Image: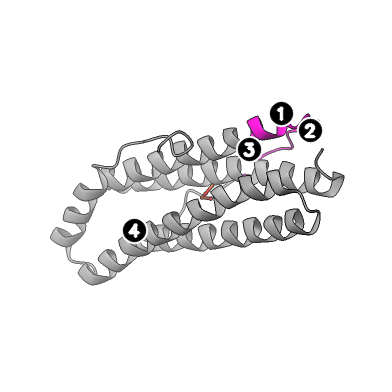
Amino acid sequence: MIHKNLQQALIEQLNKEFHSAYIYLGMSAYCSKEGFNGASNWFLVQYQEEVAHGMKLFKYLEDQNVEITLPAIESVSVEFSSLLDVFEKSLAHEQYMTQNLNNLSDIAMREKDHATYNLLQWYVTEQVEEESNVNAIIDHIKLVGDNGYGLYTIDKELATRVFVDPTTAA
Ligand code: OFO
């Protein structure tokens, strides 16, 4: 049985995971509009990952007999100023998500809810990988600056990303 306060916080996190998916869909649309088809693919895969994160939490809440509510998902921006801008905003968003997950872990620990704490550690670990991936892309973009061939090469690399469900991957 999950403590009432934690139930509410987890439902908010569920909404945030689907909001994250929506944010990445917006970023994918921006990149596609600007001709960065590889980056558009990268964000589309990110969108799929966030949906998977949301569904993992949804399933957990169901398993724990939590009465699930699904509040509206906030609208997102599809306007960015450059490829660097879109990835920097992505990093800022991931840092915000990490903070949320740390706060949730604190609550779970306080409530001595080991099952939920355990679940949240999966997300916390996932965040480390997500932040590191985006940081590496930002470094590459900064390295090439506005060199067209450099950006083209990065975009080609981003086109190779394929979705592997992180909730089932070994
Ligand atoms: Fe769901 O990990 Fe990113 O936000």
Q: Is mark 3 within 8 Å of ligand 1?
A: no
Q: Residue at x 55, y 48 (%)?
A: 122
**In the rendered image of this protein, does residue 49 appear above or below residue 132?**
above
- Observer-nearest of 100 and 121: 121
Query: Which tag, 3 or 1, sits closer to the chain's start?
Result: 3
Query: Which tag, 3 or 2, sits closer to the chain's start?
Result: 3
The residue furthest right is 4
The residues bearing labels 2 and 1 have C-alpha atoms spaced at a distance of: 6 Å
Which residue matches tag 4?
Answer: 83
Residue 36 forms part of the magenta stretch: no
Marks 4, 3: nearer the viewer: 3
Which residue matches tag 1?
Answer: 62
Local crowd at mark 1 within 10 Å, few (<14), some, or many (≥20)? Answer: few
Q: Residue at x 79, y 48 (%)?
A: 6
Which residue type carries mark 3?
Leu
Question: Which SS does the magenta portion mostly show?
Answer: loop
Q: Residue at x 63, y 37 (%)?
A: 57
Question: Helix, strand, or loop for circle 1?
Answer: helix
- Observer-nearest of 39 and 48: 48
Which quadrant of the structure image shows residue 61?
A: top right
In the drawing, does residue 157 fall left or right of residue 162?
left
